[in-house]
Image: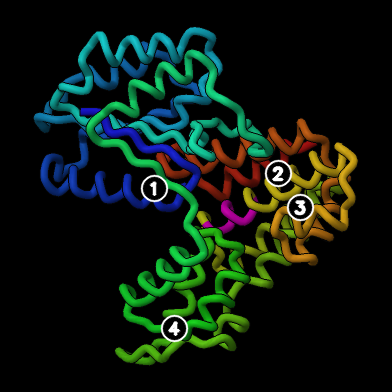
């Protein structure tokens, strides 16, 4: 069986993958021996074939997750992988293969692929289209799109209700403003607000003041401080700022989401500034708060386009390594900071 997920709503996609994994462990593999994760950006066909075809000693089925397959830079890989799936009839097998591609999305009725830095979208190449067409014809296919404003408000209310809380409509809007529509950040903020408003078994209604007091304007300021330090090549200050985040009990996933978001904003601004756009118009065009736009435009001067793309790529890879248990997030982030020239 092949399950194909794509789209840049990383939070919802990861949530769905987590549900599938949990169901597989409950129904098929209670000892969790038959689950594998492969990085499609670096894997070769031999590694994938060996993982899929190796029978499990413990269960009748194996679950394999492959992410970022469309980012693989090996010249013939995508075509070989597409042929492998079809020639070996993987879709009809008992084992479950989940393929998640965050860089592929639909846009105005067309399928496009985000560039490595996320600053533009490109049509699929012939090889990419061949693989996408095959995967999109599978029985289980889902695109994870960014939520519309109405969907986002409904999602926040639903998540807070599920966790035993309640929130005023005006506070939902305030929460969205603080989080810049980032579901990873929103999820983190919701947990903090629920905890803050709970007294014993009773949870009071969340209002605007709670959001203002609890949510992470301070964390955002520290992210600016961290990117400032990196831009000025002051690694000692960057490491100290990072340590301050851990003293605030900032979750790894939230810290990563904030760093990725900030460097993607800087990259977008860098591209537009270099193309001659007026800095006063860029912020509103990208939907950024004036404070965020001003700080980020200043930081764009610190980095080259190549540096920004490498940092975003390294942060994305660190996220993969952390989620698959191949590295400790804090250690990996310290090493990434030390690497920046």
Residue at the spot of label 4: 167
Determine the main secondary structure of the stretch shown in magenta. Answer: helix
Q: Is residue 247 left or right of residue 42?
A: right
The first of marks 2 and 3 along the sequence is: 3
Q: Which mark is residue 14?
A: 1
Q: Say which residue appears at 41% left-offset and 46% top-offset.
A: 144
Report, in whole angstroms, how far the alpha carbon at label 4 lies from the one at label 3: 33 Å
**C-beta proximity under 8 Å, tags 1 and 2:** no
Q: Which residue is mark 2?
A: 337
**Of the image marks 1 and 3, the number of the one nearer the N terminus:** 1
Helix, strand or loop at label 2? It is helix
Q: Nearer the viewer, mark 1 or mark 2?
A: 1
Res 187 seen here = no
Of circles 1 and 3, which is in front? 1
Left or right relative to 177: residue 292: right
Q: Is residue 195 placed above or below 107 in the rendered structure?
A: below
State the quadrant of the C terminus: top right
**Magenta segment, which residues?**
254-259
Give the residue number, with chain letter if any, for mark 3: 227
Q: Give how far across and how far down residue 105 sits, in percent.
A: 49, 37
Q: Residue at x 30, y 89 (%)?
A: 201
Question: On the image, which quarter does residue 211 sit in?
Answer: bottom right
Front of the two marks 2 and 3: 3
Looking at the image, is 241 positioned above or below residue 201? above
Q: Nearer the viewer, mark 4 or mark 2?
A: 4
Looking at marks 1 and 2 on the same chain, the residue that comes earlier in the sequence is marked by: 1
Q: CA distance from mark 1 to mark 3?
A: 27 Å
The residue depicted at 45 percent of the width and 25 percent of the height is 69
The CA distance from mark 4 to mark 1 is 25 Å
Helix, strand or loop at mark 1: helix
Q: Nearer the viewer, residue 313 or 235?
A: 313
- The reply to whether dot 1 and dot 3 touch (C-beta < 8 Å) is no
């Amino acid at each position: 069986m092949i399950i194909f997920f794509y789209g840049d709503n990383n939070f919802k996609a990861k949530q769905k993958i987590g549900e599938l994994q949990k169901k597989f462990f409950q129904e098929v593999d209670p000892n969790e021996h038959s689950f594998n994760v492969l990085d499609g950006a670096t894997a070769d066909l031999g590694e994938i074939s060996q993982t899929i075809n190796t029978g499990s000693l413990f269960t009748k089925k194996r679950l394999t997750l492959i992410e970022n397959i469309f980012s693989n830079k090996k010249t013939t890989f995508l075509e070989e992988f597409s042929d492998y799936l079809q020639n070996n009839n993987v879709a009809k097998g008992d084992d479950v293969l989940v393929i998640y591609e965050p860089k592929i999305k639909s846009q105005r009725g067309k399928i496009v692929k985000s560039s490595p830095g996320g600053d533009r979208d490109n049509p699929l190449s012939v090889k990419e289209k061949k693989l996408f067409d095959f995967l999109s014809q599978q029985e289980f296919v889902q695109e994870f799109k960014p939520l519309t404003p109405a969907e986002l408000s409904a999602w926040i209310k639903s998540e807070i209700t599920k966790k035993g809380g309640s929130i005023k409509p005006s506070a939902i809007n305030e929460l969205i403003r603080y989080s810049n529509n980032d579901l990873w950040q929103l999820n983190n903020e919701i947990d903090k607000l629920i905890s803050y408003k709970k007294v014993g078994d009773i949870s009071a209604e969340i209002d605007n003041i709670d959001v203002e007091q609890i949510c992470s304007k301070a964390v955002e300021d520290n992210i600016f401080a961290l990117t400032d330090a990196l831009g000025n090549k002051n690694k000692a200050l960057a490491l100290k700022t990072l340590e301050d985040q851990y003293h605030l009990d900032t979750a790894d996933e939230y810290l990563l989401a904030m760093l990725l978001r900030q460097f993607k904003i800087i990259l977008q601004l860098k591209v537009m500034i270099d193309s001659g756009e007026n800095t006063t118009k860029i912020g509103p065009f990208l939907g950024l708060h004036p404070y965020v736009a001003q700080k980020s435009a200043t930081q764009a001067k610190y980095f080259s386009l190549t540096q920004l793309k490498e940092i975003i790529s390294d942060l994305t890879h660190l996220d993969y390594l952390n989620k698959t248990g191949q590295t400790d997030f804090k250690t990996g982030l310290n090493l990434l900071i030390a690497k920046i020239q």
